[in-house]
Image (cartoon, grey):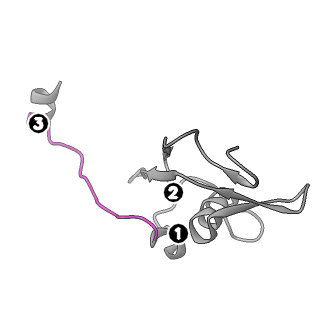
Amino acid sequence: KKAGKLYAPPGKLQLIYFIDDLNMPALDKYNTQSAIELMKEKQDYGHWWDRSKISVKDIGNTQYITCMNPTAGSFIVNPRLQRHFWTCAVPFPDQSSLLVIY
């Protein structure tokens, strides 16, 4: 907590969330993914709601980096979430490249 209702890393530091397998959360009974909806709320509005205190918690100095498994899970990401990301596709290296890397 920085000041008032602002929650952020201390000083000028940045907090980077690494989300592995963005496409893996299962759908709930409302056909949504609650973890994805929390990320979308923060990206859209810059805050989260504290339901116990009925107040806003502003979130600052944070970024998201995500990746997806190309062989499992859902292959569709909510377009309203995806618009907040720069998307690039990196194919798996071929066998000769793996020998050079490892």
Q: CA distance from mark 3 to mark 2?
A: 27 Å
The circle on residue 23 is 2
Look at the numbered discs 3 and 2 and tell me whether their residues touch, using CB distance below 8 Å. Answer: no
What residue is drawn where x is 60% and y is 66%? 40
Q: Nearest the camera: 22 or 44?
A: 44
* Quarter of image, res 89: bottom left
Amino acid carrying mark 1 in the image: Leu
The residue tagged with tag 1: helix, strand or loop?
Answer: helix
Other-residue count near label 1 (Cα within 10 Å), few / some / many at <14 / 14–19 / ≥20: some
- Figure quadrant of the N terminus: top right
- Figure quadrant of the C terminus: top left
Residue 72 visible? The answer is: no
Residue 96 visible? The answer is: yes
Is 78 above or below relative to 69?
below
Q: Nearer the viewer, mark 2 or mark 1?
A: 1
Amino acid carrying mark 3 in the image: Ser
Q: Indicate whether residue 2 is drawn in magenta.
A: no
The circle on residue 97 is 3
- In the picture of the structure, the residue carrying the numbered disc 1 is 81
Left/right placement of residue 95 relative to residue 92 reads left
Task: Choose the circle earlier in sequence order: 2 or 1.
Answer: 2
Place of residue 11 in the rendered image (x, y in percent of width and height, measured from the top left): 54, 40
Amino acid carrying mark 2 in the image: Asn
Q: Indicate whether residue 87 is drawn in magenta.
A: yes
Q: CA distance from mark 3 to mark 1?
A: 33 Å
Question: What segment carries the magenta color?
Answer: 84-97
Q: Nearest the camera: 69 or 17?
A: 17
